[in-house]
Image (cartoon, grey):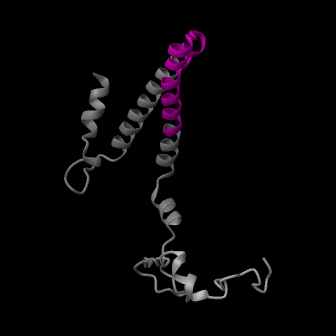
């Protein structure tokens, strides 16, 4: 095809209006709201001076001990889930007890470790803050002392 449209037998390429609506629907627009922080007057003069960056707000609200424990337990339970799922598959499909047996045992031990660490963390947090939650109940709607007492018996 040549650039001057010589190969255009019916003259379709020069008619922009004919193909303009055939390309599809209009691109939707999105209005993104900004969040202003009370007490800040936007002294730096930017339009979004009071806008909150979600990653900064998240980092400021999370206790480092809670974050560290959370991600450690995520890794522990991921290993447990993988091992408990794959170990029996080795045994059932390949009859390989030398791989499947230890994998299944690793999963069970890792899961037990994760549950023990989770409960210990919950007990330590309950001991650190004995006051009830503002709604008159306990934290997250769970009675922490009853949960901690259930671990002993």
Q: Which is more toward the observer, 6 or 78?
A: 6
Report the predominant secondary structure element of the magenta stretch: helix
Q: Considering only vertical position in the picture, is 70 above or below 35?
A: above
Residue at 49% across / 62% down in the picture? 60
Residue 94 located within the stretch drawn in magenta: yes
Q: Point out the residue furthest to the right here.
A: 2
Q: Which is more toward the observer, 41 or 4?
A: 4
Q: Point out the residue furthest to the front here.
A: 9
Quadrant containing the N terminus in the rendered view: bottom right
Q: Point out the residue furthest to the left here.
A: 136
User: Is 146 on the left-hand or right-hand side of 115?
Assistant: left
* Position in image of residue 83 (x %, y %): 52, 25
Q: Which is more toward the observer, 33 or 47?
A: 33
Residue at 55% across / 17% down in the picture? 90
Residue at 48% across / 33% down in the picture? 77
User: Is 8 on the left-hand or right-hand side of 144?
Assistant: right
Give the residues drawn in magenta, as a range: 74-103
Q: Considering only vertical position in the picture, is 92 above or below 58?
A: above
């Amino acid at each position: 095809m040549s650039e001057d449209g010589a190969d255009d037998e019916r003259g379709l390429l020069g008619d922009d209006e004919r193909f303009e609506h055939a390309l599809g629907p209009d691109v939707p627009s999105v209005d993104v709201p900004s969040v202003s922080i009370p007490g800040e007057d936007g002294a730096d003069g930017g339009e979004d001076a009071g806008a909150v960056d979600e990653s900064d707000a998240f980092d400021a609200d999370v206790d480092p001990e809670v974050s560290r424990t959370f991600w450690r337990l995520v890794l522990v339970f991921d290993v447990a889930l993988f091992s408990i799922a794959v170990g029996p598959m080795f045994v059932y499909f390949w009859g390989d007890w030398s791989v499947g047996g230890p994998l299944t045992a690793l999963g069970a031990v890792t899961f037990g470790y994760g549950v023990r660490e989770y409960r210990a963390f919950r007990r330590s947090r309950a001991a650190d803050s004995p006051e009830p939650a503002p709604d008159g109940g306990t934290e997250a709607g769970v009675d922490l002392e009853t949960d901690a007492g259930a671990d002993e018996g």
